[in-house]
Amino acid sequence: MPTNPEDLNRDEQQACLQQLLDKLAKDRYAIAPQPMPAQDPIKRRRTMTEVALGYTETQARLEALRCLQCANAPCMEGCPVRIRIRDFIAEIARGEYGAALAIIKENSLLPAVCGRVCPQEVQCQERCTVGKKFKDVNMSVSIGRLERYVADLAQGGGQTPAVAPPTGKKVAVVGSGPGGIVVAADTRRAGHDVTLFEAFHKPGGVMIYGIPEFRLPKAIAQQEIDVLKKMGVKIVCNFIVGRTRTIEQLMKEDGFEAVYIGVGAGLPKFMGIEGEHLVGVYSANEYLTRANLMRAYEFGKGSDTPITVSKNVAVVGGGNVAMDAARMAVRLGAENVYLVYRRSEAEMPARVEEVHHAKEEGVIFCTLQNPKRILGNADGHVVGMECLRYELGEPDESGRRRPVAIKGSEFVMDVDTVIVAIGNKANPLIQQTTPGLEFNQWGNIVVDENCRTSLKGVYAGGDIVLGAATVILAMGQGRIAAQAINADLAPPT
Amino acid sequence: MLYQITNKKQLSENVFQMDVVAPLVAQARKAGQFVIVSPDAETGERIPLTIAGADPEKGTIRLIFQRVGKTTALMAEIPEGGTLGYVAGPLGRPTHIETFGTVVCVGGGIGVAPLLPIATAMKEAGNKVISILGARSKELLILEEEFTALSDQIVIVTDDGSYGRKALVTEPLKEICAGAPKPDLAVAIGPTIMMKFCCEVTREYAVPTQVSLNTIMVDGTGMCGGCRVEVGGQTKFVCVDGPEFDGHQVNFDLMMRRMNAFKDLEKRALEQYYKEHKCKIGLDRK
Ligand SMILES: Cc1cc2nc3c(=O)[nH]c(=O)nc-3n(C[C@H](O)[C@H](O)[C@H](O)COP(=O)(O)OP(=O)(O)OC[C@H]3O[C@@H](n4cnc5c(N)ncnc54)[C@H](O)[C@@H]3O)c2cc1C
Ligand code: SF4
Ligand code: FES
């Protein structure tokens, strides 16, 4: 066997590496999972700054060394955009952070975002061999934290992607969430003249108005927007496609040859119970938008958007949105924040890290409970919430055990604010204003596997197609849509 | 310049009219639609204002608003030539305009402003338009001239009798509904309580009634649910399902309570603003 690895072909190199790794495997298991440094739970109850502080270099190297470099890399299969996880981790283990980032960027444009908000424990980390070995997903390699580490290292210094010579074709991107950002970047790279339209006065979608600063600093989304600007993407805010201009007008009158619709979710669901119109009942979207985008926490000190000052808050739901709302309520000064969820904690769709952080910050978990009605006083303000207790019955279609109300178990929770975080329906605006575009029964846009809609030249992706999805799925669809747009706009060969 | 105020007038002590540069909105807007505006793009609150008119040639829209809270107070301070933080729209479904026959248009207080484009469109569609305009007193009455010009018949009432008839708008409305032939449609825009009582009158005479609701809003695109109202027992979002609804189906009592959601906070903000910034604000804007 030759000794210089340079003389080997790739397969031989892999085999060689594998031999080494096999030898190391025992030791690798011995490296303890690196915990994420975080702000002190008591202190952070009153601050909006980011909770998870990020790995140190030593931690990143150690965590990367825990990776077994599996030949089949099952983690990749769990990644919705198939990042070459094993390979980027290998680079980190070697201290080649730039190379690691370059590998991630092949598939994901927003690693600083995804490293923070992806539900890794049900994606890549769920499949990780290390976690499987210990029969504990918490023992898996912390792929997300490593991704965040290399992305954060490059913050600010990231280079602006090269743009191909002008094609003379105009692309409109509607909505500036993660999907829209990716489409704008990828189509601009191909040399198209790209305009990003956003209804709000600031671009960034959910990353700006929904996910709070303490979990995803605004500066991170802002940086991505700045990169788009540097690439020459035109960003037009306060522009509601469908109302300010319709899609038909954009295409027939304004010369856009392709339109990507990434308008996200809309219409927060309410429970349809008595008392939901009382003052002090918010959708999580409204609560978080007021707090994040409109910075209501600075009300009277720089922001003019008010938010109820609450003492006792009930948040209904068990997803990321519910966790964000509950933790926001803590920061806005509530004394007691209850998280009311009708199943048990095991069924909560939120990221485990958020559940953990919420508990550390004192959010009181009330599982197997669900509101029956909201009680108000003579002025129409919330003064309490009547709940029922539940138990878990047979599994339903989703495979989760169905919660069943326990008869006669009513009790009243003493709260002055209720935040409803039970999901969204589709935003109806595009449907109302775009004849000929096909929607399904839930109002989501119907697309083919390339994100093409029923209208020629119109593409869609993200929450408006998938229902409530994730940042990474929206990004993934953005990628696919951009490829389709670039292919469809390419001159015939 | 985008969002620049090209023309500003004080219509009464607390009511202001401004023409604002927003060419795409001016082009797209239809009667009954509104915009979300903010006096300051960084710190400002977003509030909905109905578009009172537009000049697509000049690219301006007309906004008429009453100074009630800090946000409207800030807007009132911006001089002609100054700019608003932003204007987004037009939002909401346009008014359904057709030839109904006789349409009674009832406007109360500042509600007279959003009524103007609707009354104009109703007239243009060949309807006979009877207008009832109400205000607390003579000084607070706005757009009388415009309504006189477009209406086939106009009735003016004031609460204190300082001008026109001393009555609430519901009185002449009742008389007109009781007359023969009875009107084919009523449109009522004004304070929630006024719309509620107008609807009670028209319900009695089975005159279909449209109301335009001006609830609290944040995004104006159907994302937050802050604008929700109960219509016919169902939750509706004013910004995407409205702003116009069948007045006989609207639960006005629930709506009135929600409108007061931030009353105390807003009062505090306004007082603080008057105390601290009154003189400064006018200066740091151009
Ligand atoms: C509070 C909260 C927490 C979340 N936490 C997580 C998490 O931890 N991990 C995760 O993966 N996902 C999370 N999600 C979900 C994730 O944010 C979304 O799935 C994702 O952002 C969807 O992206 P999108 O591209 O569809 O657009 P969105 O981010 O939804 O953005 C759409 C944009 O389009 C704009 N728009 C809407 N209508 C129009 C129009 N007519 N014209 C112009 N612009 C318009 C909107 O204003 C918005 O800015 C969370 C969501 C929320 C609300
Ligand atoms: S599955 Fe886990 S151990 Fe294997 S390559 Fe992926 S991250 Fe490394
Ligand atoms: S204003 Fe937010 S949904 Fe209507």
Image (cartoon, coloured by chain):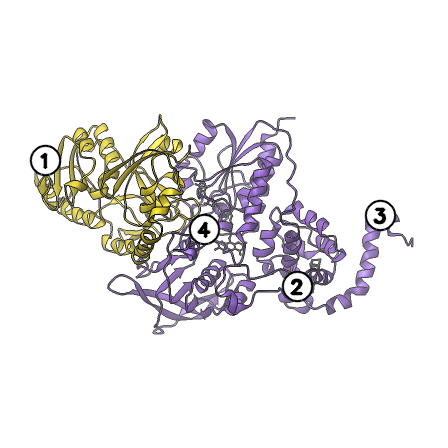
Chain colours: A purple, B yellow
* Residue B109, percent from left and from top: 20, 43
Disc 3 with disc 2 on a shared chain:
yes
Mark 1 chain? B
Q: Secondary structure at mark 1?
A: loop
Give the mark nearer the N terminus: 3 vs 2.
3
Query: How far apart, in angstroms, are the residues tagged by discs 3 and 2?
Result: 31 Å
* Residue A33, percent from left and from top: 67, 66
Q: Which mark is residue A9?
A: 3
* Mark nearer the viewer, 2 or 1: 2
Q: Mark 2 sits on what residue?
A: A140
Query: How far apart, in angstroms, are the residues tagged by discs 3 and 1?
Result: 95 Å
Q: Mark 1 sits on what residue?
A: B181
Q: Is residue A338 left or right of residue A275?
A: right
Q: Quadrant of the C terminus of chain B?
A: top left
For residue A382, which quarter of the picture?
Answer: bottom left
Q: Secondary structure at mark 4?
A: loop
Give the mark nearer the N terminus: 2 vs 4.
2
Query: How far apart, in angstroms, are the residues tagged by discs 4 and 3?
Result: 53 Å
Q: Is residue A53 left or right of residue A296?
A: right
**Camera sees residue A463:** yes
Q: Badge 4: how crowded within 10 Å, few (<14), some, or many (20+)?
A: many
Q: Which mark is residue A293?
A: 4
Give the mark nearer the N terminus: 4 vs 3.
3
Q: Are marks 1 and 4 in contact (CB under 8 Å)?
A: no
Q: Is residue B278 above or below residue A231?
A: below
Query: How far apart, in angstroms, are the residues tagged by discs 1 and 4?
Result: 53 Å
Q: Nearer the viewer, residue A223 or A19?
A: A223
Q: Give the residue type that dot 2 points to.
A: Ser
Q: Give the residue type that dot 3 points to.
A: Asn
Q: Give the residue type that dot 4 points to.
A: Leu
* Mark nearer the viewer, 4 or 3: 4
